[in-house]
Amino acid sequence: MSNQAEKAVEELTYPLGAAARLTGISPDTLRAWERRYEVVVPLRTPGGTRRYTAADLERLGLVKAAIDGGHRIGQVARLGNEELARITAAEPAPQPPTGVEPGPDASDAIMAALNALDADESERLIALQLAALGPSRFARHVASPLLERIGETWSRGDLPIAAEHLATSVLRSLMGASLRPSSNSPVGASILFATLSGERHELGLLIAAITAAAAGGRVVYLGAELPPDDLVFAAERSSAGAVAVSLVVDDSEKAVAQVKALRDGLPPRVELWIGGALSHLARDVMGITVIDSFEALEQRVKLLGLESGRPGL
């Protein structure tokens, strides 16, 4: 593994101690669950150190919730996440650690840490929310409103630009790790998520990608600033069923031109979904679907799954 790859793994994952703190499971118990039941299989550094992804933490949280509800580890260790969520939903949910619940208090604490440019505390608070809620609920109920609040605070001049950059860095790192493919990743037509040239703001896109993955989509996250031609190439190479693009930058002429070029270049079978604050700019472009809510995105993902013949969506 190259030094760059090792650094990327460290930035997108958590060591054993952090995983224990975030899940409320002792390090000895985590090791035992991995050895005896393979509840999760953490990544390993070249030196053999365990590194846990956000997806690992989400699964561990589900297993712990099931055990807290009276189930034995041997009964739940082999269950999939959906089944774990089903059995725990029928039981009183354990209360997350103090200060983890999404809401004004948690948001205030995160904003205070960001404003103080306290990177460690910002990451700790945001990571606690992610571990407690899981990627999908975190994206919808924490990350999305937090981004709105950051934008409003910055526009009033009450938040330094460095704090906005810190928030972007932490959120991109934590949410990006939660999109790491796993053995439970769905098969079938993929959905490519990207922004077009000049669109550097990708956190809304990342939130959408996590929402689509939670709805059963096979997500391929490409990130920011891809020219239309490159997206067309990626869609053809990956046999994508849809391409999802976010429009945020206020340059209507360029945005519409790029969306038209992308639609013209994509095969007719590939759907083109447009979301973001300025998605309305592309409403008149033929052959696109404007996604203006989480619910609309989830519906499109499920319809795409049915059309591509994937069962269970």
Image (cartoon, rainbow, N blue to C red):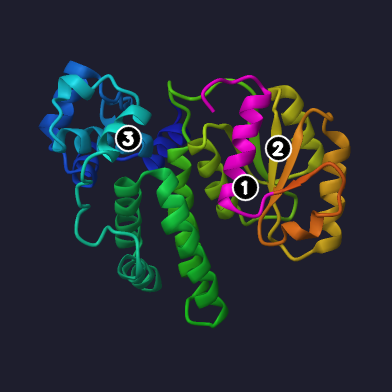
Q: Amino acid at mark 3?
A: Ala
**Closest to the observer, 170 or 188:** 188
- Secondary element at tag 3: helix
Is residue 267 at least partly visible in the picture?
yes
Q: Quadrant of residue 241?
A: top right
Residue that badge 1 annotates: 296
Compare marks 3 and 2 and give the one earlier in the sequence: 3
Drawn side of residue 165 relative to residue 305, left or right: left
Question: Residue 290 location, x and y as percent?
Answer: 73, 50
Task: Measure how far apart labels 3 and 2 are at the Cα level.
Answer: 29 Å
Q: Which mark is residue 85?
A: 3
The magenta stretch is 291-313
The verdict on residue 228 being magenta is no
Residue that badge 2 annotates: 243
Name the residue located 47 percent from the left edge and 77 percent from the top edge: 159
Q: Quadrant of the C terminus?
A: top right
Drawn side of residue 255 relative to residue 76, left or right: right
Question: Residue 17 location, x and y as percent?
Answer: 19, 41
Q: Quadrant of residue 87?
A: top left
**Closest to the observer, 296 or 139:** 296
Q: Amino acid at mark 1?
A: Ala
**Closest to the observer, 51 or 80:** 80
Compare marks 2 and 1 and give the one earlier in the sequence: 2
